[in-house]
Image (spheres, helix red, strand yellow):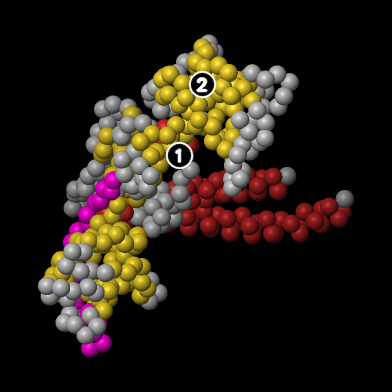
Amino acid sequence: MKRKKLFKPLLLSGMMLFFLEGKAQNGFAYKAPLDSIGQAGFYRVILTPGMIAKCKDDLSDLRILDEHGQFASYVLKSDFPSLNGERFIEFPVLSGDSVGEVRIGNWSGGAVHSLLIYINNNSVWRNWTLSGSDDGKKWFVIREHIRVEPSTADNADHTIETIDFPASSYHYFRITQEDKGVLPLNIYRAGVRTQHAGSRRYRQTPEPAITQKDSSNHHSYVTLSFTEPYLVEHLDLDIKGPRLYEREARVLVKGGGYYGVAQLYPDPASHSFDVAPMKAQAIILDIDNEDNAPLMVNKAGASQLERYLLVWLEPGRYWLLGGNMQAQAPRYDLKYFADTVSREPAEIVPGALQAAGRPAAPPAAERDHSGVLLWVIILIVLALLVFLSLKMLKAIPRNQQKEDKQ
């Protein structure tokens, strides 16, 4: 009986510690207000250089908080250009009502006139019927007797079948195998391919301070100093030199010593360079002048490729949170549907960064004692755990004696 009595306080203490641990996970140091949302839909919440500088390197501590204290699901996106000028929008593949039937959700938001079907390799012939439905119950034929030939791929484990048909905006498509008494093909992926104009959009960081040292070893060391550890992926240099020159330069950042992240070749026509992503407060350009007069870097600009959070927002007020070194990357279902957004969502640029948990203009006499209160609660819980543990240790010999007498 005593063990049961002791178990309840221990359980309560454990629950209190779990609550406190969860409380600590919400320790975001910075927040930025978002514009009030008037209409539900997808939005692009821009990650400014200032916010990224306050976050972990992998940006896993970003959150979007609504006015009810709940986090909104998001997908972290980067404005990397498409190399082939095309974009693949993947549709969910759903099981059908019978063997040989596959349903495909149309998440493009409009009409499509072809489907790309990914099939595991095979050496058989099959015939399909394609139909469509808006509610998944009433189906209407789109195309019949679609002949699927054996796979010819010899360097992959799958083949891609293209089905062309009149433009249709059904919410669901269904592939039905016409051949009876035989096993179906394994369809594991489906979607459409659309043209996508590749482009690069940048967000410029605040301008760095520049110091230059021309060494006797014929190298010039140019230090770009920032006020924050900004993410840098592009450099624009204002260089003064002779009319004709071509030099080699290394980009160095500090991390347990200095290490190179990029190689540049400035000349009179090349002052703008893409570099590998680096999050640093100081960047050094090591310019090899050989036997020439040193180049002078008068000004430098740094930029990051545009990054944003793709998020579905309901009408209301929201805040972008960051700066929690203990936070782990969230896992949201939205990542499975991010590529289904057919139109570019409206852009939201967060407001000015401010310390989280404080009013914008706190009264001079007001002081925040929440940190002291939290430590007092933790000390009380620890003292309670020590007391209960000692009590349990003293109770064990008495219980053992009683059991021996019985």
Per the rendered image, the range of residues in magenta is 199-220
Q: Position of residue 182 (x, y in %)?
A: 72, 24
| Nearer the observer, 216 or 192 | 192
Identify the residue under disc 2.
173
Q: Secondary structure at mark 1?
A: helix
**Res 115 visible:** yes
Looking at the rendered image, the quarter that the N terminus falls into is top right
Q: Residue 151 is drawn in which quadrant?
A: top right
Q: Tell me which residue sits at (26%, 48%) in the image.
A: 201
* Circle nearer the N terminus (2, 1): 2
For image coordinates 23% across by 88% down, the residue present is: 216
Quickly name the residue at label 1: 335
At horizontal 17% and vertical 80% (from top left) the residue drawn is 294
State how far apart marks 2 and 1 are (Cα): 22 Å
Q: Residue 27: image x %, image y %?
A: 39, 51
Looking at the rendered structure, the kind of residue marked 2 is Phe
Q: Dot 2: what SS?
A: strand
Please, what is the three-letter code of the amino acid marked with disc 1?
Lys
Question: How many numbered marks are there?
Answer: 2
